[in-house]
Amino acid sequence: MLQTISLFAPQLLLAVTASLLLGFGVSKTGDRSIIVRYISVGLLVLFAFIGFILGQPIGEAFKGALHVDNYSHYVNMFLGLSAAAALMFSKSYFQTEKLDRYEYSILVLYAVLGMSIMVSANSLLSLYIGIELQSLALYVMAAFNRDSLRASEAGLKYFVLGAISSGLLLYGSSLIYGFTGSLEFDRIAEVVSAGATPGIIAGMVFLLCGLAFKISAAPFHMWTPDVYEGSPTPVTGFFSAAPKFAAMALIARLVVGPFGDVLAQWQQVIIALAIMSMFIGAIGGLAQSNIKRLMAYSSIANMGYALVPLAAGTAAGVKGMLIFMSIYVISVIGIFSCILQMRIRNGMVEKISDLAGLSKTNKSLAIILSMFLFSLMGIPPLLGFFGKWFAFAPAVGAGLTWLVVLALIASVIGAFYYLRLIKAMWFEEPENEFVEAPKTLRFLSGITVLMIFPLLMLPFIASSSQSLISLAAESLF
């Protein structure tokens, strides 16, 4: 019992505290949103590091339903920190829009709890429970602005298409259970190693298709542009970071764990998803005029890049995915922190044309946003370049050089829509008068942009973080 508590301490902390905060919010008549937010931020930071505080315990909990290892500790760290940052960035937006309610912070806590269960899942049942716990919270967050028709539409679309995703996951799980007789990953791996039948392969494909929806990989990306555009901007920023990392981590655990012996089969699926995502994301973004829709296509393309190292099927490939996703999460949180600062008197900036002349009215913000965009493009010497380097190198080592060439072509195409934003900021005349952003938001975005400079981050990556990433990747093999 004590071993289970020590292994599951981060998740228990989130579950118990979120429930207590919900009761605290319901029992009070006054506005408790601010105090609940700060408690939630502190809780998420503690959640991010509690595994390391306890000495990174490793083992199985709840009779093998969850497997805690260095991999889950590393991913949980990024999930907690990115969710805490998203909560802090959302404060000024929700207060200005008069949407600041304590329920939002609690929804974030439950979403992170679901993500944490996902990355530690060791059976198809716990996998599904984690995904649904995360998804139910995200559906409500997408429609959090109940008075907005766009937000209600975004929440409804996300819910309906999410139901299809859940159907794919359940059907795939039922096929695998029917042909292996077990829901546990270890038992599934034993059956697969003895010879995978067509039924098992079909179940695996359905599972991957359901998870592809969660990372908005093409051709399961149809919800992404509409949901990103309709959801409140802080919610869109949260969607772009933590849920993508959690789902990508789950895909890696699934393919190299129970299905590690059928590399030739799942590798084809991963490669197909990667190619479609990279090019649909790169080409689809060229026609966008809305910043949030553009970021949706950027997210689709970047999930394609993250799948490239996984296609190698090696520990180096998982390591490359972890590095790429870590840098991507930092960059996308920074970009949305900048977007949240760009408010005009009529409301939030959403059109690319609204950025015209930003460098003349707010040069520091234009510089910070430009740095983040250059990082996403993979321009050296910013950290985004090293993210793609570590992502593509394992694929080259596995003989997938042609896939890396396609990824580089997609990166060049995608660079055009990032350059459109930069052109509008630096080479066009101002059209709007921006409202001054809160000092807290400006400070946080400034701190975040420092993280994409390699002179500051590479020593960290090369020492403690590099060893941690290596331990996390090796724990799956």
Image (tube, rainbow, N blue to C red):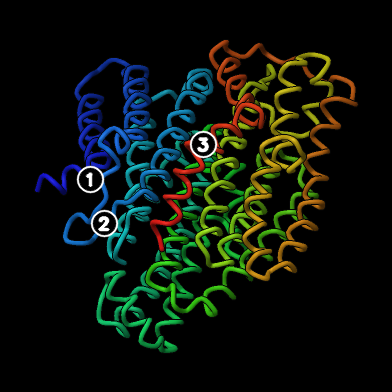
Pick whichever, 10 or 420, lies toward us.
10
Mark 1 and mark 2 lie on one chain; the one further toward the N terminus is: 1
In the structure shown, which secondary structural element does the residue marked by tag 1 occupy? loop
- C-alpha span from label 1 to label 2: 9 Å
At x 61%, y 34%, the residue is 458
Disc 2 target residue: 66
Mark 2 and mark 3 lie on one chain; the one further toward the N terminus is: 2
Is residue 299 placed above or below 231 in the rendered structure?
Answer: below
Disc 1 target residue: 8
- Viewer-side label of 1, 3: 3
- C-alpha span from label 1 to label 3: 28 Å
Expressed as whole percent of the image width and height from the top left, the position of residue 462 reads 56, 38
Mark 1 and mark 3 lie on one chain; the one further toward the N terminus is: 1
Is residue 360 placed above or below 69 in the rendered structure?
Answer: above
At x 50%, y 68%, the residue is 209
Instruction: Report if the CB atoms under discs 1 and 2 are less than 8 Å apart.
Output: yes
Instruction: Report if the CB atoms under discs 1 and 3 are less than 8 Å apart.
Output: no
Instruction: Report if the CB atoms under discs 2 and 3 are less than 8 Å apart.
Output: no
Amino acid at circle 1: Phe
Disc 3 target residue: 463
- C-alpha span from label 2 to label 3: 29 Å
Pick whichever, 231 or 120, lies toward us.
120
In the structure shown, which secondary structural element does the residue marked by tag 3 occupy? helix
Q: Quadrant of residue 222?
A: bottom right
Amino acid at circle 2: Leu
